[in-house]
Image (cartoon, helix red, strand yellow):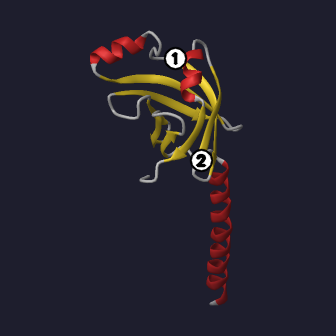
Amino acid sequence: MCMKPRLVTASLVALFSLAIPAAADEKKDAPATSGTWLKKDGQLQIQFPEKGVMKVAPHGDKAFIVALSYTITKDGLVKAKITDLEGTDEIKEKAKARLPIGLEMSFSWKVKDESATLDDLKGENTDILKSHLEGEFTKKRSD
């Protein structure tokens, strides 16, 4: 009878050790949507402060920030929607015409090591965003 508890314990340990690498592999396949990313050829900064939240600082500072909610499809496509504009009332009023709350877009976000590429931005009335958002990014080291 003493053998059965040991056998059960050994089986549980084996089961959990198999489950942990599988979970790590799934996470490895998903695009890294965490931390802060800096555009290589400009001031633009993208931050993923929490799951499902993305913040874009066009000038790399907190003077003006575009907040978006996002989801990621199984194919790795990011679908985003502007949820808020942060900054002074004057700045937000000027930005509303080009960046209205509710504006939806999709794009590809591919990460390799400390580099990422935002590409294939699509959506109605998003042409102006394409030149600003698309490009190569590096991960900010303090994250």
Classify 10 Å Cα crowding around label 1: few (below 14), some (14-19), many (20 and above).
some
SS at badge 1: loop
Question: Pointer 1: what residue?
Answer: 103
Q: Is residue 1 visible?
A: no
**Residue 79 versus residue 18 in the image, above or below:** above
Indicate whether 57 appears above or below 12: above
Q: Quadrant of residue 85?
A: top left
Q: Residue at x 29, y 14 (%)?
A: 90
Comparing 142 with 31, the one in front is 142
Residue under label 2: 115
**In the rendered structure, which amino acid carries the disc numbered 1?**
Leu
Q: Position of residue 23 (x, y in %)?
A: 64, 58
Could you tell me residue 84's position as x and y percent? 40, 23
Residue 59 percent across, percent down from the top left? 41, 30
For numbered disc 2, what is the local secondary structure? Answer: strand
- Of the two numbered discs 2 and 1 on the same chain, state the one appearing first in sequence: 1
Amino acid type, mark 2: Ser
Describe residue 80's horizontal placement relative to residue 53 as left or right: right
Q: Pointer 2 and pointer 1: residues touching (CB < 8 Å)? A: no
